[in-house]
């Protein structure tokens, strides 16, 4: 996995959450993910395809962190994961990918983004459709944890 692909997603996630929700996350140690089980309660997944690259990106939030972000962004805190929370996770997935797309474009990687898909529930799975390793990056926050997964295949 090329670090050129990973870092734009990390910095974009930290930027989006600190700007939109004043939430600070502490990055952990990346590792290769060997299964499809999500490391959170609600996940956004988005596919990306370009001339020299294809892959997918996902972000999973613990329920408590998702509800905290919702409360900070919109001033309302639901009792659990509902349609408003899944919409917010989809929007965050879109914003993070858009930010990463801009950074990757500066390095010569162009791709189009699909519409994000959001899945929730204990033990849900995330299916990355690209060949190649899945990099799992944990983040720690005051209200809970988040994990991003990046799976890319590049011809470059």
Image: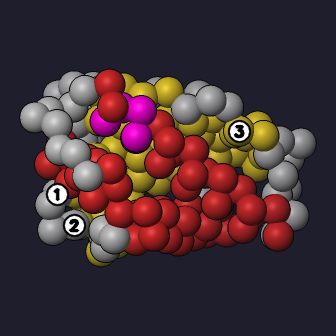
Left or right, 49 with respect to 39, comes to right
Q: Position of residue 41 (x, y in %)?
A: 22, 36
Name the residue located 87 percent from the left edge and 64 percent from the top edge: 108
Q: Which residue is mark 2?
A: 141
Distance CA(mark 3)–CA(mark 1): 28 Å
Is residue 69 visible in the rendered image? The answer is no
Name the residue located 57 percent from the left edge and 44 percent from the top edge: 94
Is residue 27 visible in the rendered image? The answer is yes
Please state which of residues 140 and 83 is positioned toward the viewer in this rendering. Answer: 83
Name the residue located 35 percent from the left edge and 63 percent from the top edge: 21
Indicate yes or no whether the magenta region holds residue 52. no
Left or right, 46 with respect to 145, comes to right
**CB contact under 8 Å: marks 1 and 2:** yes
Specify the quadrant of the image occupied by residue 123: top left
> In the rendering, which numbered label is found on residue 113?
3
- Vertical placement of 150 versus 131: above or below? below
Specify start and end residues of the magenta stretch as a single range. 85-89
Q: Which residue is mark 1?
A: 144
Please state which of residues 144 and 133 is positioned toward the viewer in this rendering. Answer: 144
SS for dot 1: loop
The residue most toward the front is 75
Q: Position of residue 103 (x, y in %)?
A: 72, 67
Specify the quadrant of the image occupied by residue 113: top right
Left or right, 54 with respect to 12, comes to right
Distance CA(mark 2)–CA(mark 3): 27 Å
Name the image quarter holding the C terminus: bottom right
Distance CA(mark 1)–CA(mark 2): 5 Å
Please state which of residues 29 and 79 is positioned toward the viewer in this rendering. Answer: 79
Binning the other alpha carbons within 10 Å of mark 2 as few (below 14), some (14 to 19) or many (20 upward) gives: some
Q: Position of residue 91 (x, y in %)?
A: 50, 42
Specify the quadrant of the image occupied by residue 55: top right
């Amino acid at each position: 996995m090329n670090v050129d692909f990973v870092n734009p997603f990390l910095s974009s996630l930290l930027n989006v959450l600190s700007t939109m929700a004043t939430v600070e996350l502490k990055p952990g140690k990346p590792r290769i993910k060997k299964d499809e089980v999500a490391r959170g309660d609600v996940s956004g997944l988005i596919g990306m395809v370009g001339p020299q690259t294809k892959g997918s990106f996902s972000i999973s939030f613990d329920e408590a962190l998702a509800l905290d972000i919702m409360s900070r962004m919109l001033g309302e805190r639901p009792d659990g994961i509902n349609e408003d929370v899944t919409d917010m996770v989809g929007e965050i997935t879109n914003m993070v990918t858009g930010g990463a797309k801009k950074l990757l474009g500066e390095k010569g990687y162009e791709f189009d983004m699909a519409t994000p898909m959001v899945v929730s529930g204990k033990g849900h799975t995330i299916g990355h459709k690209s060949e190649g390793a899945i990099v799992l990056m944990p983040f720690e926050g005051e209200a809970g944890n988040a994990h991003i997964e990046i799976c890319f295949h590049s011809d470059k």
